[in-house]
Amino acid sequence: MTLLESITRKLKRDTKTALEKPSEFRKDVAYTIEGIQRGVVDPKDVAIRALSTIATVVFVFVLLIPVYWVLLMALQGEGATLYSSESAGLIPTDVTFEAFIWVIGDLYIPGAVVGIAIPFTGIEFFLSWPRVYFLQTADYGVEGSSNFTHYLRNSMFIGVATVTIAMAMIVPAAYAFSRREFYGRMKLLYGYVLFTQIGGGLGIAALIALYAIFSNLGVTNNRLVLSIYYAAMAVPFNTWLLKTYMDSIPVSYEEAAVMDGASPFRVAWEIVLPLAKPGLATIFIFIFLVGWMEFIIAQVVLRPENYTLPIGLFMMVEEFTVPWGRFSAFALLYASPIVFIYLLAQRYIESGLSFGGVEG
Amino acid sequence: MSISSVGARSRQGYRAVVPENVREWIETNSAGLLVLPGLFFFSLFMFFPLLFTIYLSLTDAEPATVFQDGPGGVTGFFGLRGEETFVGLGNYTAIMTDPGFWNSLGVTWLFVICSVALKVAFGVGLAMIMTSEKVRGKRYLRSIIIIPWALPPIFTITIWRGIFSSARFGLANQFLMTIGMEPQAWFSSRWMAFSTYLITEMWLAYPFMVIITVSALQAVPDELLDAAKVDGAGFYHRFVNVTIPAIKRPVMFAAILTAAASFTQFLIPFVFNRGAPGRDNQLIILYGYQEAFSHDAYGAGAAIMMTAVFFIGIFMLFAVWKGRLAEGVNG
């Protein structure tokens, strides 16, 4: 069973459960009412439960108001949030997608003329097509657009480079930690865990020296060098995570393969790696998010043409009069993939996220 | 001479040169090679900059000197050194007499103490609600309240800056106006700005505390609580005598981790108002950062960062000594 199949199966089951919930709830209520009428259930008990549940739901809503507020402002577009105070109630009025359109900007395939010559025949013909628009901001009365796509390109570049470099270092190391014995193995593992949990601040503390080193080597404003840095920072946590996942794969498969005469490399490549797919998917996400979320180092090292999404977000909030509607749309478009991935991973990539007794 | 004979001869040479016990050691530890690339790069980007921070803290480095072409060669760290000169412990004595540094260190510790107390109290309280038998649908609520955990810190912090915006449409000011109070300029008074840091830090970190505490609370045996109930213990006594002893260790450990995170908090003051008014609210990392990048004193900045590293080291020792770190490392 592949990972995708298991995800689709779980998705189906979840949809079914979600659809059945209302009727189940109605049955529950009917059962409780019947219980009260027959005198089996104490009405005071029911009242306490209902009240405390409602109170908790209200409390959770108040706690998460910042998220709701962002959503609201993004949906109200520009003018509504800045100047009129009555628009900022808890229920949105005048819903527009103007702010989102401004953030995304024009989407098009650039027009071009391509000449194709077939050699030795002298036949030559030209293909040309105009600019093909998927989304034109002017159609919606939105002037200009943000640099979102520009930042996105930089973030994607850094994310992909970070994942590639980090995977090359982490996967062999996790395998060695999980399956082999070597000098200093436990000590190193212990050190990695310690860094994962407390060491986050050390990276920022070394920021000044890092900048001086990068400047002296002439590699500031270099996306690839920054990716290598992120990959290196991702090593301790993700090696440990993948190692814990590999530990949960039974050794008997490998023993069987060894009995059949497979070389150690083949055992690792054809048995351990395929079985570790959920773990690999998990660390893939975590490593990708390092570059997607990191702000401090990127902000010191990069120049405007290489700015990533977090810096773009920060630039918007630094403006003299912050366009809150547009800012919120930018922030949501930036954060929503992460929330989506987290929730998905939490539910559907089984046991990939459970480590050290902490279920994510 | 065939290629295979070259191989055979070099193998012979290897056997002749390398003693048997060394060869054996290499053979049994060869898997360590798989770990080395990651370890190498991690050390290169983690420990080398830290060592370089120590070096910088002992010099008078500033942009005018540190980015010049230095002596080169081995003594110039192959071009990493600029024209800065060695001043010994001068930077350290200078920051020791700098009232701004002591203020920053004091504010940082105040921030750590207040925020950890808030986070623990709020996290445990929320976890109690989320495991209470009187509340229905706890599983769904639990997965909703940890959403802030999944949000990128820069997202959360910029949003909270919007909430505490001094203009009338900031959410905090709207709330004040609804209950009939005047809108406030949140970031311009020292302690008000400090409280906004605290609230934001709490919102950032409560999901972590809730997750740890909920899993600890679920491990409390129901029989114990029932027995206490039968013996006539009220809610308070049950909480103090049964629940607290059961969840003390995990919560304690989570508090150490989150205290270390609070100590190195940089983004909140940086994004909110750069630690204004003045440099009153610059937490220690931000203070060092500003010293280097706004006041051009790289040497003094590095010395301030080293004091932060010193405290992070203490947090690490504390975690090793007190914590259950080893339980995550099995086999």
Image (tube, grey):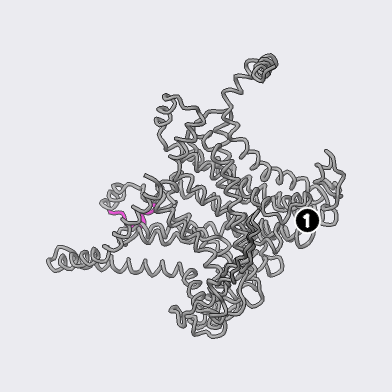
* Residue with the mark numbered 1: B97
Task: Say what amino acid the circle numbered 1 marks.
Answer: Thr
Q: Is residue B122 visible?
A: no
**Whole-percent x, y for residue B313 in the image:** 63, 45
Residue closest to the eye, A169 or B186: A169
Let me know if residue A130 appears in the view: yes
Q: Quadrant of residue A195?
A: top right
Instruction: Please tell me whether residue B106 is drawn above or below residue A322 in the rendered image.
Output: above
Is B60 included in the stretch rendered in magenta? Answer: no
Find out whether residue B236 is within the magenta segment. yes
In this rendered view, identify the residue nearer to me: A102 or B322.
Answer: A102
Span of residues in magenta: B232-242
- SS label for mark 1: loop
x and y percent of residue B169 in the render?
55, 80
Q: Residue at x 42, y 28 (%)?
A: A257
Find residue A353 and report its horizontal and vertical position in percent: 45, 48
Which residue lies at the image location 57% right of the left edge and 65% below the top edge?
Answer: B157
Give me the chain letter of mark 1. Answer: B
Q: Residue B9, percent across and down? A: 68, 16
